Image (cartoon, rainbow, N blue to C red):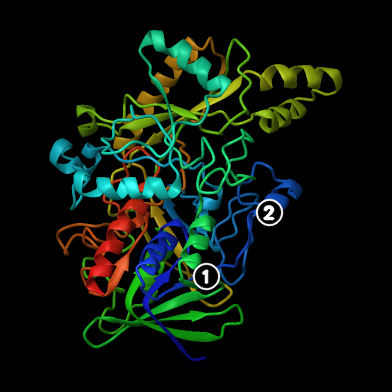
């Protein structure tokens, strides 16, 4: 052991959620220490890495991979960190570095709908949240102001105050979808995003690079790296390359310290009054399970046997097609707009709700590969590429998933370079998802017809992609026998241990989880400050 460090509050994880709660507490005069398993980097380095990478369709390619803090990679090859136990694959990808995975997100920053928080009561499926939308609403607004969120007020989520910014300028492809679908009753609205439509918080407005993933080259969209910078500017101390491998408790069950390795496997001990576990929905339950003891043989915070269970994401299927007119996708944000009429309704008792996202990402790389594989070259290649790149678009859904207890994260028998067991995922899809996916395919066909679509290519039936929205594995609830934390993220089993992140969400809803996780963390910070 190489000495002991101490702080009032110790935060494990420097992603957008952990860094935000750290900043909030540090501003209020609390001493805060953030421990991050991965290294530091900066936007300039990441942009240069991507520019020089031959794998332009790999959103992980520009990000540092650390042997001491590995993360799952599925392009070009599965690196074996996240062990798949089936029966359905869960190819998660996330970044372990200062700032976390929102370095390469599409910046969608939606609120859930009030009915998303009352699924069991209203529709007889899923779970109810232990707090109301009205209780969370002011923290949603605080998160939106901090992150710089723009969007349409027609998105179904009640608001007490307006967005900090108007929507980002409409792209041509987005406009043509809106105009051509409106006569049939489809309303296309701007996606709610943490992306600047004007200069905001010292950062410029979006200039349409269409590079949101893997990295916005000008910081027009908010991300965890900015959140970590803000936390340090407020007075929080951050230690990078600090791989927490055990949480230590005392005889009464209070958390006494955490232990971390540096890259050379030297061990350090950190004490505190309050501990906040803010790694993601896979790494956080992994750490709780790693910290099993004689007193807590199933792992910490796990008297309910729900740590790691109820894993949810947003499964997607897809349609790619060619429009009859040139729309020139690839200018503006990558996911600018969506169709929302199937996010809620009585049908949720029978099948999953979903949102249909309209992609405005450049299709040039995929089209080029397809044409070359067919033997097209020379002038013909240039002509076909220009024609197809102007017209090829895609639709995908963002579908809710029920919190099934068998979908879970456990420890595998495999160990990483520091000798720490890696996570293993058990994952499956149920008929609730399959029925929703079947309806989505019908909706896609209607939309394609309205766009004069041809050359329709649906994703394989029964094969869905995930969206890296890792939710539910530390789920909150009012009953300690059925949940991990209360509505403030406090562990039912350890009074000075809090969880923060998407893992504590009770349901997945039909929207990206980040804004909700940040809002919940701000609410938790208020409770933590009061307890101190």
- Label 1 sits on residue: 37
In terms of sequence position, does the residue under pointer 1 or pointer 2 come before the other? Answer: 1
- Is 102 above or below relative to 189? below
Within the image, what quadrant is residue 322 found in? top right
Callout 2 secondary element: helix
| Position in image of residue 250 (x %, y %) | 28, 86
Callout 1 secondary element: loop
Q: State the residue at coordinates (39%, 45%).
A: 144
Q: What label sits on residue 44 in the rendered view?
A: 2
> Residue 513, can we see it?
no
| Image position of 122 (left or right of 151) | left
Q: State the residue at coordinates (34%, 30%).
A: 153
- Is 459 above or below relative to 419? above
| Position in image of residue 456 (x %, y %) | 55, 18
| Position in image of residue 251 (x %, y %) | 24, 88
Q: What label sits on residue 439 in the rendered view?
A: none
| Position in image of residue 114 (x %, y %) | 22, 39
Question: Where's the C terminus, which quadrant?
Answer: bottom left
Q: State the residue at coordinates (48%, 57%).
A: 227
- Front residue of 380/106: it is 106
> Residue 362, can we see it?
yes
């Amino acid at each position: 052991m190489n000495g002991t460090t101490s702080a009032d509050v110790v935060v494990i994880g420097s992603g957008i959620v952990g860094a935000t709660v750290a900043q909030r507490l540090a501003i209020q005069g609390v001493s805060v220490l953030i421990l991050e398993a991965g290294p530091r980097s900066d936007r300039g380095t990441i942009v240069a890495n991507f520019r020089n990478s031959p794998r332009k369709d790999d959103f992980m390619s520009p990000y540092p991979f650390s042997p001491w803090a590995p993360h799952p990679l599925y392009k070009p090859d599965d690196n074996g960190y996240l062990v798949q136990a089936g029966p359905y694959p869960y190819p998660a990808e996330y970044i372990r570095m200062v700032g976390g995975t929102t370095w390469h997100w599409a910046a969608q920053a939606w609120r859930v709908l009030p009915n998303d928080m009352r699924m069991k009561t209203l529709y007889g499926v899923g779970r109810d949240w232990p707090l109301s939308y009205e209780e969370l609403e002011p923290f949603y607004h605080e998160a939106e102001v901090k992150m710089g969120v723009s969007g349409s007020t027609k998105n179904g989520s009640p608001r007490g105050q307006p967005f900090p910014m108007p929507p980002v300028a409409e792209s041509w492809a987005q406009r043509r979808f809106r105009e051509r679908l409106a006569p049939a009753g489809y309303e296309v609205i701007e996606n709610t995003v943490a992306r600047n439509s004007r200069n905001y918080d010292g950062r410029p407005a979006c200039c349409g690079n269409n590079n949101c993933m893997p990295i916005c080259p000008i910081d027009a969209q908010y991300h965890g790296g900015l959140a970590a910078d803000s936390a340090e500017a407020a007075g929080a101390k951050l230690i990078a390359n600090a791989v927490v491998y055990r949480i230590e408790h005392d005889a009464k069950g209070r958390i006494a310290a955490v232990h971390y390795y540096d890259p050379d496997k030297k061990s350090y001990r950190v004490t505190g009054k309050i501990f906040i576990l803010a790694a993601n929905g896979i790494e956080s339950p992994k750490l709780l399970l790693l910290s099993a003891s004689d007193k807590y043989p199933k792992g910490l915070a796990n008297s309910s046997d729900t740590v790691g269970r109820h894993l949810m994401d947003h499964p997607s299927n897809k349609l790619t097609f060619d429009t009859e007119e040139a729309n020139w996708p690839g200018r503006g944000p990558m996911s600018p707009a969506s169709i929302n009429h199937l996010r809620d309704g009585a049908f949720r008792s029978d099948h999953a709700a979903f949102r249909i996202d309209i992609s405005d990402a450049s299709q040039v790389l995929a089209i080029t590969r397809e044409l070359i594989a067919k033997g097209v070259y020379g002038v013909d290649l240039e002509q076909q590429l220009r024609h197809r790149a102007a017209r090829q678009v895609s639709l995908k859904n963002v579908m809710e998933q029920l919190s099934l207890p068998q979908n879970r994260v456990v420890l595998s028998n495999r160990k990483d370079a520091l000798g720490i067991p890696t996570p293993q995922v058990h994952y499956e899809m149920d008929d609730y998802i399959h029925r929703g996916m079947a309806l989505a395919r019908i909706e896609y066909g209607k939309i394609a017809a309205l766009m004069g679509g041809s050359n329709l290519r649906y994703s394989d039936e029964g094969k869905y992609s995930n969206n890296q929205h890792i939710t539910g594995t530390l789920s909150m609830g009012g009953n300690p026998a059925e949940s991990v934390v209360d509505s403030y993220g406090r562990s039912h089993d350890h009074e000075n241990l809090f969880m923060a992140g998407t893992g504590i969400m009770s349901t997945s809803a039909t929207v990206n989880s980040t804004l909700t996780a940040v809002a919940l963390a701000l609410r938790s910070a208020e409770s933590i400050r009061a307890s101190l």
